[in-house]
Image (cartoon, grey):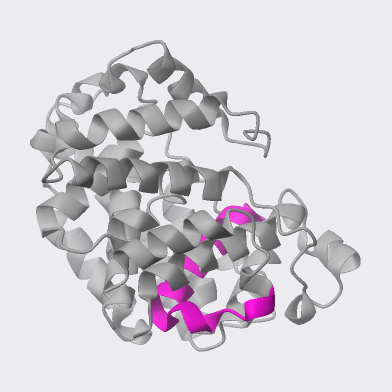
């Protein structure tokens, strides 16, 4: 058994820790600090950022919700909200978290309905750097997985592109965990985006769309899917002529926004689908949001290859290891 959930969660945290020291640096600065990118070493100690912390918060919220019964919007929203607020108040929340997450979680803490706390004009990568658990939880229907992925995004990032990118990221993790061949992944994601392009999930999102200037909910959500489709086209073009020695951000974006984080994380993974450490190192040595890009790359690689993808010497010293392993064991099938 490859233990895809364990592999994905550990890979996500390893990528986060590898990219933490290189975030906000350009590639020449990273090379000067870390040496050749193919030889980058996991920092000691292997400290993660808010990306892994919020992934764990979402995972705990999902676990609580599903312990109480069928995963439905109201049952999911409360424990995830509580976990996000707990993260916001934690003294460990000192890893350069994004402003959107901080602002939205503050509003959630004050008791605002989530639809009012959501930052509807933000499509930052916080929408999807934490969503992998939604793709790893077994037994969800298509509607549950997609709805949960979009709702967890909407609690902080309510922009339609954030919703679509979070949905696509969870779907990619699910496909890889189930054994989809990496080279067919982009086509499957594109088909999924086209199928869902005008589908606004009223049960999960309520009237969120009314906080935008869109005339209809379908117009609102279509904007998001179209931006994701455009970046998937850029990804497909980049893969046709990929040069591993070139900064991936030049092809698919710096990753500060959700659709670019998805595409650049996928680009790093798909250039090295059977070399997970090389993929992580390439993702960490980028000029953009290195920790989030590498975080997503690790989630994809671990879902594809399983827990044995990661050397024990790395996996054994990642921060939050015990909780990551416990959740992985719960969801491995």
Membership of 225 in magenta stretch: no
Q: Is residue 177 left or right of residue 107?
A: left
Pinpoint residue 255: horizontal percent, then vertical percent.
54, 53
Q: How many marks?
A: 0
Location of residue 247 (image quadrant): bottom right
Q: Is residue 212 left or right of residue 287?
A: left
Identified at 35% across, 56% down, the residue is: 133
Pinpoint residue 53: horizontal percent, then vertical percent.
53, 44
Q: Is residue 245 left or right of residue 52?
A: right
Q: Nearer the viewer, residue 312 or 155?
A: 312
Q: Is residue 134 above or below residue 268?
A: above
Location of residue 281 (image quadrant): bottom right
Magenta span: 288-313
Q: Nearer the viewer, residue 298 or 183?
A: 298
- Magenta stretch: helix, strand or loop mostly: helix
Pinpoint residue 149: horizontal percent, then vertical percent.
27, 48
Quadrant of the snapshot with the N terminus: bottom left
Q: Nearer the viewer, residue 278 or 190?
A: 278
Q: Is residue 280 above or below residue 180?
A: above
């Amino acid at each position: 058994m490859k233990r895809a959930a364990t592999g994905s969660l550990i890979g996500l945290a390893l990528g986060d820790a590898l990219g933490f020291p290189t975030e906000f640096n350009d590639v020449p600065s990273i090379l000067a600090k870390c040496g050749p990118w193919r030889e980058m070493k996991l920092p000691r100690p292997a400290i993660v950022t808010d990306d892994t912390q919020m992934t764990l918060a979402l995972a705990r919220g999902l676990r609580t919700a599903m312990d109480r019964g069928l995963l439905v919007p109201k049952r999911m929203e409360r424990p995830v909200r509580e976990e996000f607020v707990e993260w916001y108040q934690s003294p460990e929340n000192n890893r350069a978290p994004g402003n959107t997450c901080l602002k939205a979680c503050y509003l959630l803490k004050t008791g605002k309905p989530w639809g009012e706390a959501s930052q509807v004009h933000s499509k930052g990568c916080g929408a999807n750097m934490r969503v992998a658990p939604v793709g790893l939880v077994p037994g969800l229907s298509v509607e549950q997985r997609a709805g949960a992925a979009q709702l967890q995004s909407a609690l902080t990032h309510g922009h339609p592109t954030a919703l679509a990118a979070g949905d696509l990221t969870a779907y990619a993790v699910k496909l890889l965990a189930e054994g989809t061949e990496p080279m067919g992944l982009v086509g499957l994601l594109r088909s999924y985006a086209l199928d869902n392009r005008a589908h606004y999930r009223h049960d999960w999102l309520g009237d969120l769309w009314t906080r935008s200037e869109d005339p209809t909910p379908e117009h609102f959500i279509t904007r998001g899917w179209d931006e994701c489709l455009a970046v998937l086209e850029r990804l497909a073009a980049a893969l046709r002529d990929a040069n591993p020695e070139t900064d991936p951000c030049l092809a698919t974006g710096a990753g500060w926004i959700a659709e670019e984080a998805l595409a650049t994380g996928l680009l790093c993974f798909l250039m090295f689908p059977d070399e997970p450490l090389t993929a992580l190192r390439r993702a960490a040595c980028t000029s953009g949001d290195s920790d989030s890009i590498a975080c997503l790359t690790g989630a994809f690689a671990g879902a594809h290859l399983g827990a044995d993808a990661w050397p024990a010497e790395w996996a054994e010293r990642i921060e939050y290891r015990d909780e990551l392993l416990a959740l992985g064991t719960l969801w491995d099938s």
